[in-house]
Image (cartoon, helix red, strand yellow):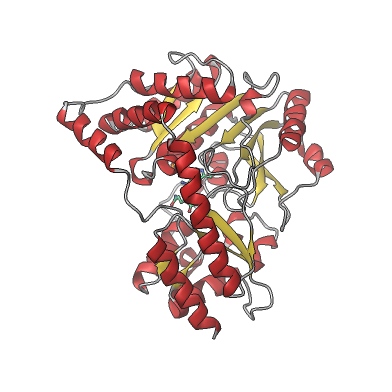
Amino acid sequence: MTQSAQRTPMDLSRMAKRVHPIGESIFSEMSRLAVEHQAVNLSQGFPDFPTPDWLKEAAQEAIGRNINQYAMSQGSLRLRKAVARKAERLMGIAWDDTREITVTNGATEAIFDVIQALVNPGDEVIVFEPFYDSYVPSVEIAGGTARYITLQAPDWTFDRDRLAALFNDRTRAIIINTPHNPTGKVFTQEEMDFIASLCHKHEVLAITDEVYEHLVFDGNKHIYMASLPGMRDRTVTISSASKTFSVTGWKAGYVLAAPDLTEALRRVHQFVTFCSAAPLQEAVAIAIENAETNSYYADLQRDYAARLEKLSGALERAGLRPIRPQGTFFIMSDIRGLGFADDVAFARYMATEVGVACIPPSAFYSSSNEGTMLARWCFAKRDDTLAAAEERLLGWRK
Ligand code: PMP
Ligand code: GLN
């Protein structure tokens, strides 16, 4: 539970029991603290630079062209076709845009819908920790139980025997987020092959969260689980336009999965939101179509690699020991020896006294205390934002 949820005791008696354990998201809490204290906000992961003009114009034109009524529940045909073509090129396998692709309100809705659609009460779902914060509530609302395997700092490897031992008769799915938030880990071919072999052996589904698929650095390569031998049918691939096109507020996500899994997901999706914003679907379709024919993804990587250098240099100079990420737009740093009781105390102090907000990663762990000596910093920021953060960090260290 987050600090603010603890701070404000609330009468739970009129709330359904399934929501009792849910606290406020750490992202809302830290962004609020950043605003309250006018801190440079390197906490919640979103770009503070503008969405490209051509993409904003595509959305405005879509509204002008009267694409303003409900889209098809499964997503507009143009967007599903664009996703299918892109996925075919990147994964090397064909997708049926009619029966295998669904558009959702961001990856967040996709994660929720997929889990409600595929996990029965009593099922177990294996989750790597630290984890993105929506996985566990989604599993618990479905009546499932999360089982945890820890990625160990600083290289974020995991104990293969421990992972193998988590698979049992009740295991329904494993969630793999690569590139991984918050560690920046990009799962290697070998690790993906190992996870795939366990999925085959125990007939378990792989749910992959690939929203950072285009943010990989230093020659690391994003591996699509669905592209591994025999995994196309067992994998539910989730991605989103949020990070790739700098439109986190558009909530434009999508899912690729075999027809029966897609059918299950669509049954949930139609009653959660029915469809996502029609003109934004049109604009995202255009964005994906264009990116197939120009250097958009390479340019994005180049720009983010430069931002990574800026923030990691700043953290280094401030003695905050960055752990170099292989992907995503986050850096974890080691806060041991700085005199703070834990990551929450550190993050509060940084936001309120130093004026730079970060995320305390213990929010992304179940019960292990592995996160308590780490901090997560977002570099999806303008140069002047990163420079302002550095100035404040260096001022504090003096
Ligand atoms: N998964 C991960 C790992 C994320 O970091 C995020 C945050 N944006 C999401 C899913 C949610 O993506 P969306 O904005 O498309 O809902
Ligand atoms: N994905 C973003 C992060 O990790 C936050 C998304 C959200 O606020 N729900 O910071």
The one of 315 and 66 positioned closer to us in this rendering: 315
Instruction: Quadrant for residue 250, please give it.
Output: top left
Against 100, residue 382 (above or below) is below
Residue drawn at (74%, 37%), measured in percent from left and top? Answer: 191
In this rendering, does residue 272 appear at all?
yes
Against 119, residue 267 (above or below) is above
Which x, y percent locates residue 310?
A: 51, 62
The one of 141 and 334 positioned closer to us in this rendering: 334
Residue drawn at (15%, 30%), measured in percent from left and top? Answer: 64
Which x, y percent locates residue 37?
A: 37, 74
Residue drawn at (40%, 71%), measured in percent from left and top? Answer: 39
Total of numbered circles in the picture? Answer: 0
Residue drawn at (60%, 60%), measured in percent from left and top? Answer: 332
Against 209, residue 321 (above or below) is below
In this rendering, does residue 23 appear at all?
no
Quadrant of the drawing holding the C terminus: bottom right
The one of 286 and 103 positioned closer to us in this rendering: 286
Q: Which residue sits furthest bottom?
A: 398
Which x, y percent locates residue 199?
A: 72, 28
Which x, y percent locates residue 198?
A: 77, 30
Against 129, residue 276 (above or below) is above
Q: Is residue 78 left or right of residue 19?
A: left
Quadrant of the drawing holding the N terminus: bottom right
